[in-house]
Amino acid sequence: MATLTARVLPLPLGNGRHLVERNFLVYRHAWVVFVSGFFEPVFYLLSIGVGVAQLVGDFHLADGTAIGYAAFVAPAMLASSAMNGAVFDSTYNIFFRMKYAKLYDSMLATPLRPWDVATGEVTWALLRGACYSAVFLVVMLVMGLVESWWALLALPASVLIGFAFAGAGMAMTTFMRSWQDFEFVQLATMPMFLFSATFYPIETYPGAIRWLVEITPLYQGVALERALTTGTVGWTLVINALYLVAMGTAGMYVASRRLGKLLLK
């Protein structure tokens, strides 16, 4: 009777924490997999800071400030790593848990709701991504690639980027039927990584293409991180942040509705 009552009565917001605790316990025994995520973005940064940056001159920001190429690319790498980490956690891992491990079927047999599953998985992706971003920022600081105290907000900004892509990634995963569908994930993320003003200024694009790049989600993150680490802060950053918030919230809503439709039918 108590169990039935718990299912019928509205549950308090925040039950997704149980899923976060579950993932923490799992990765506590697979810490090597967790720690390995620190290295890829750092290796990217080192290869650019030590190698490519020696071949490229200084870059001039919109306000005329000159910075080195490594300082220009580093915040874009931070945004890209936040995107990649969030997408990986919210697509491949969730697809396996949903289609093969049947984890969510058993969870929804408890008082947990689809919204709790969505918030729990996205929160875990954000916590994991925040750890990686914090280490990346420390490396940037050690290499002298931080130009402003505004960089203190770069970590919250990377969490916001992770939120946007984690919500969208989880929503997309609920529509996937097999592992072959993950080709579309790479088809979406790779062009964004290469062309979202990651390696060269947005001004290099002609008008129509520049407009197309500026409406992509990763560009919002790159613009946000670059402005914070270089100190070129303006009111347009509010638009970048709101874009990411809306994207993540919409993704979580769609994911929770789809999970309910797929698992509670």
Image (tube, rainbow, N blue to C red):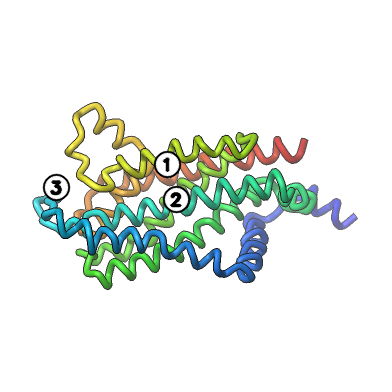
| Residue drawn 41% across the image and 45% down it | 244
The amino acid marked with disc number 1 is Thr
**Residue 155 in the image, given as x and y percentages of width and height:** 37, 62
Q: CA distance from mark 3 to mark 1?
A: 27 Å
Q: Residue under circle 1?
A: 189
Residue that appears at 70% across and 43% down = 99
In which quadrant of the rendered image does the C terminus lie? top right
Q: Which residue is mark 2?
A: 84
Residue 33 visible, this angle: yes
Residue 61 percent coordinates (x, y):
14, 50
Helix or strand or loop: what does disc 1 sit on? helix
Nearer the camera: disc 2 or disc 3: 2
The residue that mark 3 highlights is: 62
User: Marks 1 and 3: in contact by CB < 8 Å?
Assistant: no
Going by the picture, which residue comes out furthest to the bottom?
Answer: 142
Image coordinates of residue 260 in percent, x first then y, are 70, 39
Callouts 1 and 2 close, C-beta under 8 Å: yes
| Dot 3: element | loop
Q: Earlier in the sequence, mark 3 or mark 1?
A: 3
Tell me the distance, in whole angstroms, between the alpha carbons under discs 1 and 2: 8 Å
For mark 3, does the 10 Å Cα neighbourhood hold few (<14), some (14 to 19), or many (20 or more) residues? few
Residue type, label 2:
Asn
Closer to the camera in the image, 47 or 115: 47
The amino acid type of the residue labelled 3 equals Ala
Q: Earlier in the sequence, mark 2 or mark 3?
A: 3
Q: Position of residue 45 (x, y in %)?
A: 30, 60
Front residue (pair 219, 237): 219
Report how far apart the C-alphas of labels 2 and 3 lie in the structure: 27 Å
Q: Is residue 36 above or below residue 120?
A: below
| Mark closest to the chain's N terminus, 1 or 2 | 2
